[in-house]
Image (cartoon, rainbow, N blue to C red):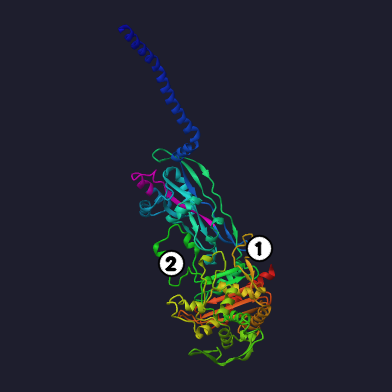
């Protein structure tokens, strides 16, 4: 029995010894399979990603900004381009505190720079691309040449090219063209995924902002090899940037210059010139203005910013798209309301007098006597207040609001830079009942005095020069509401929804046209006539400033009569004396240039 038990134990021990190699082999195979699987995963499945990560640790890209597309006028003349400027940089990873004084002094002597300023720039500067600090900007050609000659002995210093936006005509069309500015950190958080860099510039206002994606291009850069400490070892090459696309605008440089010159002696104002058939903007000028080149400077002081942004004259505000009291230029809208309402048909004649009482106030005619019994055409010709008081009050606020809406008032015009646009105001009974925007609902009812004022474009009516140009285009083109625009974009601007038919009776349109023609032929707009001016229609306007300032002067015109090819609205802000005295000569200067250039082309 004992021998039998011992034999069994020896057999189990031998069996276990024979199984150990198999267990070890299985373990080795398992570990090897895991290692092979891991290697396959690293090298095959995830190899591309890890190679990219390794390159990112070894290679850095110093961004190079793209050249922004040019802005051209309708004839191909440059309105905005880019210019090269040379800047001096230091690479902080290659220049420590011990070696900096020697490099600083050599740069100061070589480039005739202030060593103290270089110290300040290095101490307070930020390496905006991770590798360089800007020490000096706008280097002269001779400074660049001297640096290139000595560059091998100036380790850690670098002269590089910056591409800045440049506006060759300075303040010309500044509000329309806009400007570019560095993006903010908060903007970068959302724009980074679109390819923007932290040192990128973006269109802020105007066409620069509206067509940002068309103009901006794509970044390139210089590839640098760095070691584990982040020190630059060598330059590996360049990835070229992709230039932005040029953009041809509808603006005409000759007309824009004429408009800006016409505004030169006015404290403020605007001029709009547009094609009434397509809505193409030919000139869009505003005063006070600013120089967009200011925003292209690499270094700007807070004092300079404050002088522009805190200026009480508000030079950054586009008067062409801000709302003001329109005065008598509004009478064409009241005429449309009267006729379209059916209460005052085209053949209507009314007695005009020295003044008419509404509520507790006697509203006067501007000549103090009235013009006898007249119809619409003569009422526009003489700009009779008492005629249009009767039409406006008789038709009512809803009829006036309906006509205004049909002509595009109290709404955005559709222009590409419309985020800067004020929609204005056309007051009516519902607006007054709701509190007029400042009072408790029900506390400010609509009263007869409101309607009388609204009839002649005062107090409760506020419009922009651009809106008025769009409305007068309806009279010029035979009844179509167009969309003002600054670039064609390959679109047909005479097709819906960019151009729509206005619900206006032919008799209404013809009556208003006849009146606008009489204004120029022998009425308040007679001063428009002269050599170089085709037959035209128009309307003068003198408006009290509801904010308390001096009167505004207006003139809206189109030519040739009756089927217009250009509409011009001239607005002189707080320039008392009348639309025929101040605004009409402004429009005439633009009209003369337009007529001269169109006959040559």
The tag on residue 492 is 1
Q: Nearer the viewer, residue 9 or 448?
A: 9
Q: Quadrant of residue 485?
A: bottom right
Q: Which of disc 1 and disc 2 is earlier in sequence?
A: 2
Foreground mark, 2 or 1, reads: 1
Identify the secondary structure beneath mark 1: loop
Q: Is residue 322 visible?
A: yes
Which residue was labeled with disc 2? 309
Specify the segment rendered in magenta. 82-104
Q: Residue at x 45, y 41 (%)?
A: 56
Q: Residue at x 55, y 89 (%)?
A: 365
Given the current orientation, which residue lies at the most extreme left position? 2
Identify the secondary structure beneath mark 2: helix
Q: Nearer the viewer, residue 182 or 186?
A: 186
Specify the quadrant that holds the C terminus: bottom right
Residue 105 lies in magenta, yes or no? no
Mark 1 Cα-neighbour bin, 10 Å: few <14, some 14–19, many ≥20: few
């Amino acid at each position: 029995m004992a021998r039998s038990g011992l034999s069994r134990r020896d057999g189990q021990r031998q069996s276990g010894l024979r199984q150990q190699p198999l267990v070890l082999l299985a373990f080795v195979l398992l570990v090897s399979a895991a290692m092979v699987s891991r290697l396959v995963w690293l090298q095959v499945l995830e190899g591309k990603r890890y190679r990219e990560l390794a390159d990112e640790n070894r290679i850095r890209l110093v961004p190079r900004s793209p050249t922004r597309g040019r802005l051209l006028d309708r004839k191909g003349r440059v309105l905005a381009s880019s210019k090269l400027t040379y800047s001096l940089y230091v690479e902080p990873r290659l220049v420590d505190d011990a070696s900096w004084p020697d490099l600083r002094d050599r740069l100061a002597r070589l480039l005739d720079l202030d060593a103290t300023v270089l110290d300040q720039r290095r101490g307070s500067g930020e390496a905006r691309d991770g590798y360089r600090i800007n020490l000096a900007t706008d280097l002269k050609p001779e400074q660049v040449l001297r640096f290139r000659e000595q560059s091998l002995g100036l380790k850690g210093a670098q002269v590089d090219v910056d591409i800045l936006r440049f506006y060759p005509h300075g303040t010309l069309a500044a509000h329309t063209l806009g400007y570019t500015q560095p993006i903010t950190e908060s903007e970068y958080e959302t724009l980074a995924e679109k390819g923007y860099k932290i040192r990128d510039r973006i269109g802020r206002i105007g066409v620069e902002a509206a067509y940002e994606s068309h103009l901006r291009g794509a970044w390139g850069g210089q590839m640098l090899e760095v070691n584990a400490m982040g020190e630059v070892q060598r330059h590996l090459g360049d990835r070229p940037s992709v230039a932005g696309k040029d953009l041809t605008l509808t603006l005409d440089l000759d007309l824009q210059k004429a408009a800006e010159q016409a505004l030169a002696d006015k404290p403020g104002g605007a001029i709009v010139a547009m094609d009434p058939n397509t809505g193409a903007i030919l000139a869009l000028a505003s005063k006070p203005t600013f120089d967009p080149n200011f925003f292209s400077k690499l270094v700007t002081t807070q004092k300079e910013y404050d002088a522009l942004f805190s200026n009480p004259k508000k030079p950054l505000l586009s008067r062409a798209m801000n709302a003001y009291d329109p005065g008598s230029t509004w009478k064409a809208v009241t005429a449309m309301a009267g006729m379209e309402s059916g209460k005052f048909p085209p053949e209507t004649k009314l007695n005009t007098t020295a003044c008419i009482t509404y509520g507790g106030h006697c509203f006067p005619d501007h000549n103090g006597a009235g013009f006898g019994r007249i119809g619409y055409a003569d009422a526009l010709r003489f700009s009779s207040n008492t005629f249009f008081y009767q039409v406006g009050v008789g038709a009512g606020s809803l009829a006036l609001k309906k006509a205004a809406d049909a002509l595009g008032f109290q709404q955005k015009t559709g222009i590409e830079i419309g985020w800067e646009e004020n929609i204005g105001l056309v007051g009516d009974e519902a607006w007054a009942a709701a509190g007029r925007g400042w009072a408790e609902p029900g506390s400010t009812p609509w009263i007869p005095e409101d309607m009388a004022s609204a009839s002649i474009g005062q107090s409760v009516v506020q419009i922009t020069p651009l809106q008025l140009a769009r409305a007068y285009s309806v009279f010029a083109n035979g009844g179509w509401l167009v969309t003002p625009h600054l670039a064609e974009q390959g679109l047909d601007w005479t097709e819906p929804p960019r151009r729509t038919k206005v619900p206006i009776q032919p008799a209404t349109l013809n009556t208003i046209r006849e009146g606008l023609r009489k204004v120029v032929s022998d009425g308040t707009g007679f001063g428009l006539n002269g050599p170089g001016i085709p037959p035209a229609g128009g309307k003068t306007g003198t408006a009290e400033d509801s904010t308390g300032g001096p009167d505004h002067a207006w003139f809206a015109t189109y030519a040739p009569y009756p089927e217009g090819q250009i509409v011009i609205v001239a607005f002189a802000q707080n320039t008392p004396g009348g639309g025929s005295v101040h605004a009409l000569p402004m429009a005439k200067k633009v009209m003369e240039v337009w007529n001269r250039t169109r006959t040559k082309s």
